[in-house]
Image (cartoon, helix red, strand yellow):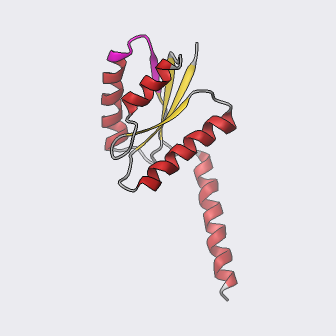
Amino acid sequence: MKTGLVVFAHGSRIESANESVRITAAALAREGSYELVEAAFLELGTPDLAKAIGILVKQGANRIAVIPYFLTPGLHVDEDLPRIVDGISRIYNGVKIYVTAPLDGHPALVRVLLDRAREAVESFRGGE
């Protein structure tokens, strides 16, 4: 059994934003020692989710975790993503696809916000 991971983001007309997601997916692979990791986009970026899953399946993945790179639940996570995954599951019927929760509610988000708040407070101190 081989597991692949997909970091699934919205996508942007600004290519550097899409590249940032790809860099994050590569960092996930490297830091987590995961062999099979792809970035994918709902729109405005490539590859889309079906193509990313196809790449992982060709590399031998038969279990795929889709990690929504979205802060909160909403239309794309709650409606679009399940519909897309359902269609992909019909194509790759021997592949188990699991969709994680979005980033919302993860305790690491508070730590990130604390870091940003500290940066802001320090920048204010520097200007006094």
Magenta residue check for 18: no
Kindly identify the residue that appears in the image at 46 percent across and 54 percent down: 17
Q: Residue furthest top?
A: 94
Where, quadrant-wise, is the C terminus in this rendering? bottom right
The image position of residue 105, as x and y in percent, is 53, 45
Residue at image coords 68%, 75%: 122
Provide residue 10's location: percent of width, then percent of height: 38, 45
First to last magenta residue range: 90-98
x and y percentages locating residue 97 in the rendered image: 45, 22
Classify residue 95 as left or right of residue 82: right
Q: Does residue 33 appear to the left or right of 14 in the view shown?
A: right
Do we see residue 104 in this rendering? no
Q: Is residue 22 visible from the viewing direction of this image? A: yes
Q: Is residue 74 above or below residue 95?
A: below
Q: Is residue 30 above or below residue 119?
A: above
Q: Quadrant of the N terminus?
A: top right
Which quadrant would residue 25 be assigned to in this image?
A: top right
**Residue found 62% across the figure and 48% down from its top:** 108
Residue placed furthest toward the bottom: 128
Judge whether residue 95 is colored magenta: yes
Image quarter for residue 110?
A: bottom right
Residue at x 43% of width, y 47% of height: 72
x%, y% of residue 120?
Answer: 62, 73
